[in-house]
Each structure stands twice: as C-alpha cells, then as structure tokens.
Amino acid sequence: MKRVVVGLSGGVDSSVAAALLLDQGYDVIGVFMKNWHDTDATISDDCPWEEDSKDALIVAEKLGIPFQTIDLSETYKERIVDYMFSEYEAGRTPNPDVLCNREIKFDVFLKAALSLGADFVATGHYCRKEEIDTTEGTMYRLLAGKDNNKDQSYFLCQVNQEQLSKALFPIGHLEKKEVREIAKQRDLITAEKKDSQGLCFIGKVRLPDFLQQQLKPKPGNIVEIASQSEKYDTISTDDVHETVYVESDGEVVGMHQGAHFYTIGQRKGLGVGGKSEPLFVISTDVNTNTIYVGMGDDHPGLSRSCLFISEKETHWVRPDYALKVGEEKKFLGRIRYRQPLQHVTVKALENGLVLQFDQPQKAIAAGQFAAWYDGDELIGSGVISH
C-alpha cells in the first residue's frame, strides 16, 4: 500500500484531498505545517493558524487517519519572509505564494514526508499531474485545474520534475462546488469554511504594517507623469525597452513614506486627492526614493508588451522544452494568478529570455513570476528582471 502524507491546512480543499486518497486505497497521514505564528500585522480573524490547526486535527479524526504538526516557521522566515523584505527593499514585487510551494511545501515538507516513509505528498491545489514517456525518459506534465476559476497551476510554476514525481493533486479534476459537496457528504467541519486569503500561511495582512516590521519609513516625492509626456529616457537591454522617468518629467503632487512600500499598478495608499481620475503607480525608484504615478487606468505608462527574465531566474518545468539561444516559440503566458492567458512569444538570448506579448500587459513589475503554457500545460516560468 502506497503511503501519502497530505498537507492538511485546515481548509476544505486539503480535507477533501485526504478523503479522496483514502477512497483510492492509500495509507494516508495528515500533517499540519505550522509556518507562521506572528500576528502583529495580520488582520484579526483572517487565517489564524491555531484555528486552522484545530480544524485539521478534527478532519483527521473524522477520517480516522494519523495526524501530526510540523513546525517549519524558522525555515519559512528565512526562505519566504526575509526574501519578501529584501525584494521590497530593492524595489521589486515578490510573490511569496510561488516561493512557498517551491521552498516549503515541495522541498522542506516533501523531505519531512519522505522521512515518514511516504511515497508521495498531496495538497489541495487545483491542478493536475500527468505522467508521459518522452525521448528523454519519463516526464511529468503540470496541468491546469479543471475549474477555470480556481486553477492554481501558476502557484506551482517553480516546481521541478523530481518534485512533481512525488506530488499528488487529488482535487485537480473537480470544481470547487463539487469539493464542498464531497465535504458535506463526509460531514467534514471544513465544508462551509471560507477560503483563506492573503499570504501563504500568514493570511491577510496590512502590507505596509508588515513591511514596516523591518523596512523603515523614508519620506519621498510622488511625481505625476502626464499621459502625453514624451520627456523620458528609454534604455534597451536585449530587445526589452524600459521607460525610466526622472523627476523633471512631471509634477510633484504629494509625499510617500518609502518607495519600497509600493508596487507598479497600485492605486490605494497614495493619499493624493483632487484628481479627475484615480492615480496609479507606473514606476518606482528606490535609489532616489521616488514614486511615479499616472492618472487613469489607461495611462500609457501602466502597460508594455515586453519583459526580460535572466538566465539564472529561468525555470523549465518541462526541461525538454527549453529553448536554445536564438530559438523562439509561441506560448500562452500570464504574469499573475488568475490573469487570463495571453499570447506570448518566448525568445532565448545568451543571458536569458525575452517574452513578447501580442497585446500590451498592465502593471508588469520586476520580481513577479511570469509563467508560460502550451495549452493547459505549464511549461516554464521565471522571475521578471525588468
């Protein structure tokens, strides 16, 4: 009998994943990952780990499976939280949920599961895995979940073939409403529980408060760039053009408390009124501590068609798809979770990849993950350099 360790989060998805694995005849062990317990910046009652842990235990008892808690908070702080702080400080926009899957769930947690004699680890992600034979041997396809509204393949865009070989996604073929119905039929306490939101294992946070735990406020100018402005310098790196604004391009319209607290596309928290349309962040400069904003969500500074991913930040989930220098291929891509897939051409250069979208994309920010698909299969991803 194959043994599976299920990451029981205290939510309905992982609860049903464990139940389905039992039905399939696996030897199932439930493990709750305690990865965060500092609630200083957490919004009250949004994903407290104590309640989640209790619900996970109740589910395990209901299903009649062994249960234990593993404390990974020290590793989580080092690999995820410290990474977040350093990225924001550098003026980049990290995605901790993607890193959490790569560094915690399918690395540290996977190794802990294997030490318990597990053949696989399972999670409640809405995605699917398929094993195929290729000329390079057995490969594992990471496929989008059947529920288009809940597809979470993007969050797994950094996993590798070894990790996929040990992973199971029992609910990937189901829609959310079906998952809740199964939970009701099994009389699981999580059947009606709200989905957790916010940062992986932390919940909803007041991001400025969270960042200020380590990053100090630093007053600076908010500069508005007119939509028709042509006063900017354009730099080019490997076919990727980036607009670099300077303060003389626009008008100082307010003050902020630190450029590292803001990200491209952000609307809230600027504190500048008296405009006919909302202001959006179109660029930040942590070196001069300046935020550049534009009026209206159709401001040309908000959109561009091209981005660059350095070679060291490029990851191929399917290594047999990796492009050689000079090659290019059409895929479908996205730069954030739940963004509809966009037509994109991926071109390999000597020092990385250029992604050229058919249509301009809003709020491309350094530090985000871009992922590209062949149909519903996730092929590769990378951290946006610029």
Image (spheres, helix red, strand yellow):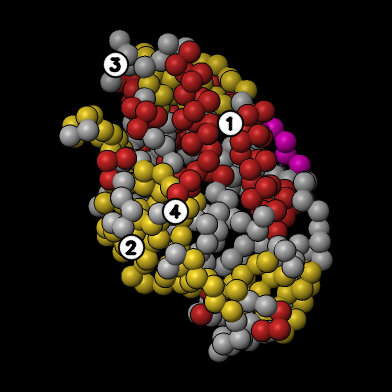
Q: Is residue 69 above or below residue 336?
A: above
Determine which residue is flagged by label 1. Answer: 52
Q: Looking at the picture, how far across and down is residue 110, in whole percent?
A: 47, 24
Alpha-carbon span between mark 3 and mark 1:
26 Å
Determine which residue is flagged by label 3. Answer: 25
- Does dot 4 land on a helix, a strand or a loop? loop
- Does dot 2 land on a helix, a strand or a loop? strand
Q: Amino acid at mark 4?
A: Asn
Q: Earlier in the sequence, mark 4 or mark 2?
A: 2
For the record, the magenta segment spans 36-40
Determine which residue is flagged by label 2. Answer: 344
Alpha-carbon span between mark 2 and mark 3:
42 Å
- Is residue 242 located in the magenta-colored stretch of the structure? no
Which-is-in-front pick, marks 4 and 1? 4
- Does dot 1 land on a helix, a strand or a loop? helix
Determine which residue is flagged by label 4. Answer: 351
Alpha-carbon span between mark 2 and mark 1:
40 Å
Q: Earlier in the sequence, mark 3 or mark 4?
A: 3
Q: Looking at the picture, how far across and down is residue 360, in whole percent?
A: 41, 72
Q: Earlier in the sequence, mark 4 or mark 1?
A: 1
Q: Main secondary structure of the magenta part?
A: loop
**Residue found 48% across the figure and 53% down from its top:** 310
